[in-house]
Amino acid sequence: MKFLVTLLALSISGFLSASEEIKFHDGGRNNTYVVELISSEDIGEKRGLEIIANAATKKCGENPTQYGKYRFHGQENLSSNDSSGEISFRMIQQLYCGKLPEITQETTKPLNDQEKSKLERQAKKFTGLYLNSIAKSDYKKAYSFLSVVIKEDKTIPGMGRH
């Protein structure tokens, strides 16, 4: 319900056109989100970032907005397996509402062997599933694997992965 209110407010205020949709997904930590912008038109990187920034400012309220990594796809039909030539645009942006926590030695400790092994197994599994989906031209399924990885992302927005 909160999402629909946000989307309605953005549409009324003119930040979104009828062809654009913003979704906020839980980023796995308090005040951490994965923002997804979908448009049926190729609006471009600059306009996509403007729309996300406006939505993020409203979502975070009085808390500072901290942006992490983003990526986008333009002029691709990501919603089906056919090649109808439909133009679409999708942008994913990491967002943290609030001050970033200070990094301490405890938060940057190296993984132990068991943790490394678990991550390696998960990476191999998802990579195999993703590549098999691409090989079968099942792009919707391949994208769904990427979405799962993003939703379970354990990095702090704005901080690089090591």
Image (cartoon, rainbow, N blue to C red):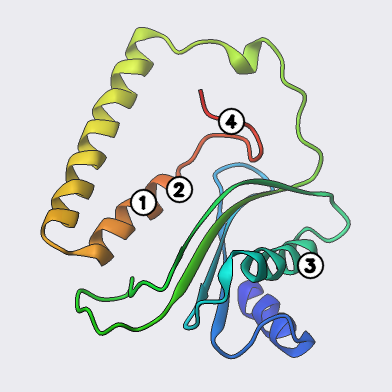
Q: Hey, which quadrant is residue 75 in on the image?
A: bottom left
In the image, residue 89 sits, relative to residue 72, either above or below, namely below
At mark 4, the secondary structure is loop
Whether pointer 3 and pointer 4 mark residues with C-beta atoms closer than 8 Å, the reply is: no
Question: Which mark identifies residue 150?
Answer: 2
Between discs 4 and 1, the one toward the N terminus:
1
**Residue named by callout 1:** 146
Residue at 66 percent of width and 44 percent of height: 30
The answer for how far apart the CA atoms under marks 4 and 2 are is: 14 Å
The answer for how far apart the CA atoms under marks 3 and 4 are is: 26 Å
Instruction: Please identify, in this view, whether the residue under mark 3 or under mark 4 is nearer the observer.
Output: 4
Apparent side of residue 60 relative to residue 23 in the rendered image (left or right) = right
Residue 70 image position (x, y, % from top left): 56, 51
The N terminus: image quadrant: bottom right
Instruction: Please identify, in this view, whether the residue under mark 4 or under mark 1 is nearer the observer.
Output: 4
Residue 27 image position (x, y, % from top left): 56, 48
Q: Amino acid at mark 2?
A: Ile
**Residue named by callout 4:** 160
The answer for how far apart the CA atoms under marks 1 and 3 are is: 26 Å
**Residue named by callout 3:** 58
Residue at 58 percent of width and 55 percent of height: 93
Apparent side of residue 128 relative to residue 22 in the rendered image (left or right) = left
At mark 3, the secondary structure is helix
Q: Amino acid at mark 4?
A: Gly
Q: Relative to the observer, which residue lies in front, 101 or 45?
A: 45
Between discs 1 and 3, the one toward the N terminus:
3
Whether pointer 2 and pointer 1 mark residues with C-beta atoms closer than 8 Å, the reply is: yes
